[in-house]
Amino acid sequence: MNSPRSLIRLHRTPLVFSHMNRRKLVTNNPVPDPIYHRIQKHVRPAFMIAEKREMPCYQISATYLKKNKSFAPLNRRLLRKARNPKKNSCLSWRLLIAGNKHDPEFIWDLYQQSKLTARASLAVGSDFVNAFLELKDFNRAFTVWKDYCLFLANMAIGLINLAPNQDLLRDIWSEIHRKSHQKQEISNHLLYHYTKKLAEFDFYIAQKFVLENSKEDRRPEPWIAIVRACGKRKKIKELYDVFVNLQGLGIDIQPIIQSLCCALAQTRPEMIFAVFQGRLEYYSSITERELIGLIISFNMEMMERGLHESKWTIPLQGFICRNRWQGAKQVLKYVEEKDRKALLPTLKFYLLEVLKKEKCKHGLLLEDVEQMDENFLEGLYYQVLKDSGKDGNMQILARMIEQKNNNPTAKKPTGQSPQEQMEKMGGQGEQGKRKDSDKVATG
């Protein structure tokens, strides 16, 4: 039996990029983020198109994709259709990519074949890049993206997040400028993710990039990325320097204030907790006074409206980030006494952070915490106050697992009983380190 790679025979026919899809992407109605919206609107999954076609081969392919079955019996037929320019070759290529995503070598050979035999459409190229991004194969994903004729912002973000070093990150940025027709085409999300990744490699180079970029571009997204990087580095002096630069450039701080407050909580959680309590005598240095003065000058209710949870999650996250569980319990106690209606949202946030911090195969999902009964959460609250730290978190997770198993509407953990899961967690939990979630706050 022939191997998947042996099915592919290269033919010497010229590569022709199709521009027929370009007209579909142009609209007379401007949108805030043109590239991002255009891609999300255009590219549809291959099986959704295939199941509406009358040809049996396409309908069978759609069924195989939905049931996650092996594509080995279909590869030869689909390759024959893909090589035939008179057939619907684009859909055949897309189905081949979707059905063989687990095999990077086969996908790479498919790409070489498609370059020589097919008219490369937007959807086909998009699927090739996404397949390599899912496989974490940066070099091949970047090669395909560079060869592609259109600028796709969501793929550029995937490449940026996967970039292994600073030099390749700069190559991606240069390619973005080459592909984009004007600077305004670089979306807010793209600018944020580039700055964030650059700060991971070298914070000071990222800061210099943002300062130079802000002379012409006043968008807050790169500054949000820099502020969050300061929070992770836990250096209040760097956070203060960012604040001074924002004032000097005259950039609107309103879209950045929430990220600034969260970063300050990661650096000085007691300070933010004191401010939220109305105790303004805590801070001592000039740097702290100026930063706290900035936060107080803004309408706290307006900032709280932009949060998915209560405002108390900000100091709570700061304490948890620094593994200061007693401080986190103090926040929960204060919320119970002074702001009772915010207790359950704050407690849910605490449990979600525990779930992220203890990275182990416990069978719990973030959705499971969101769906937990209020009465159960109130009972769990007292255990949280009693037990904290590593051992306490394990006991809390054990109760959550038991609650999930007793809930008939919840998804069951796969393959292990709660006791086995807890034994597994005991060996693996020590290795888990929390990574902060990166939601982009846009202005």
Image (tube, helix red, strand yellow):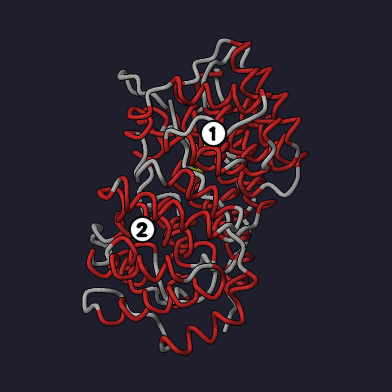
Q: Position of residue 79 (x, y in %)?
A: 48, 63
Q: Is residue 52 above or below residue 419?
A: above
Which kind of residue does numbered mark 1 sit on?
A: Leu
Res. 416 image quadrant: bottom left
Quadrant of the snapshot with the C terminus:
top left
Q: Position of residue 105 (x, y in %)?
A: 64, 65
Q: Residue furthest right?
A: 167
Between 279 and 321, which is closer to the camera in this rendering? 279
Q: Is residue 153 left or right of residue 41?
A: right
Give residue 190's mark. Answer: 1
- Residue 73 appearing in the image: yes
Q: Residue at x 74, y 42 (%)?
A: 201
Q: Position of residue 61 (x, y in %)?
A: 35, 68
Mark 1 / mark 2, whichever is N-terminal: 1
Residue pointed to by mark 2: 348
Figure disc tally = 2
Disc 1, SS = helix
Which kind of residue does numbered mark 2 sit on?
A: Lys
Disc 2, SS = helix
Q: Residues within 10 Å of mark 2 (few under 14, many from 20)?
A: many
Q: Is residue 14 left or right of residue 277?
A: right
